[in-house]
Amino acid sequence: MKTASFLIPLLLAVAGPNALAQAAAGDAAKGEAKAQMCIGCHGIVGYQASFPEVYKVPMIAGQSAKYIASALTAYQKGDRKHPTMRGIAASLTEQDMADLGAFYEAQGKAAGNTAPTALARPVPEPLKDRMAACVACHGANFSAPIDPTYPRLAGQHADYLYAALKAYQTDGNPHVGRSNASMRSQVVQEADGKKKPTFSHAELKQVAGYLASLPGELAVVPQSRLR
């Protein structure tokens, strides 16, 4: 198997671990009220999580409603282990997730960001072969995924992307890790009871840094808790 074939599911699983879209139709107005529990992290520019790892919380305004619902479902099921997000997702209904997704999708549109239709910056040579196939799922600008449950990646925080990618290589940690059989098979080779990462952490960091450098439609929209 060629190296480039590894990276498509690698990137899809960064923030799209649940392939099933939520069936509920979201209401952005209701989602705005429910987002009060989210804005303490996602509504502050530059806010950085400190546990279980240190990185900027991901930008979610501008992601699709179905992606956000899919990610929340993964936290609720325990496929993503982040303690805070798991605690929040545990209390949500399918309708809550759909409403929150609708709100953050609409919020991103209101922010007025528009990604270019083509890559604004060429893929660096050391990554070119590995990332050639990624366009098939995320679009030529990494902001036009072919399925709404897949994430937009362009412009996302590099440290978050890096943490998300390497989480699939993490075992036995109650606070860090992401479970996805397809993703696991791409980032870790297992044979004869031995495990070997398909990508080094340095390589994952390169991928994350490049994606973060691209202009995209993701944003942090400052919000006040006092409403």
Image: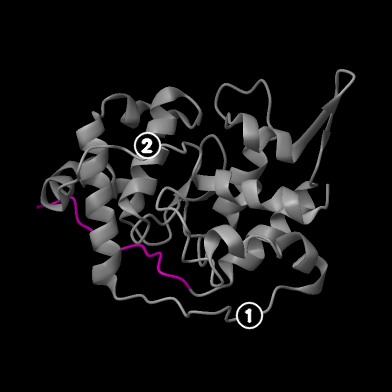
Q: Return the x and y of residue 173 as percentages of the image width and height.
A: 63, 23
Q: What secondary structure is found at the residue carrying circle 1?
A: loop
How dense is the environment of label 2, judged by Cα within 10 Å: few (below 14), some, or many (20 and up)?
Answer: many
Three-letter residue code for mark 2: Leu
| Rendering coords of residue 48 (x, y %) | 47, 51
Farthest residue to the right: give it: 192
The percent coordinates of residue 21 (x first, y second) are 36, 40
Vertical arrangement, residue 106 with respect to residue 193, above or below: below
Numbered label attached to residue 172: none
Q: Which residue is mark 1?
A: 121
Q: Determine the image quadrant of residue 111.
A: bottom left
Residue at x 48%, y 32% (from the top left corner): 82
Residue 173 seen by the camera: yes
Please give the name of the residue rendered at 73% of the width and 40% of the height, measured from the top-left corner.
Answer: 187
- The secondary element bearing badge 2 is classed as helix
- In the image, residue 180 lies in the stretch drawn in magenta: no
Range shown magenta:
216-227
Which mark is on residue 72? 2
- Is residue 221 located in the magenta-colored stretch of the structure? yes
Helix, strand or loop for the magenta stretch, by majority: loop
Q: Residue at x 26, y 25 (%)?
A: 91
Q: Is residue 191 left or right of residue 122?
A: right
Q: Classify 107 as above or below 192.
A: below
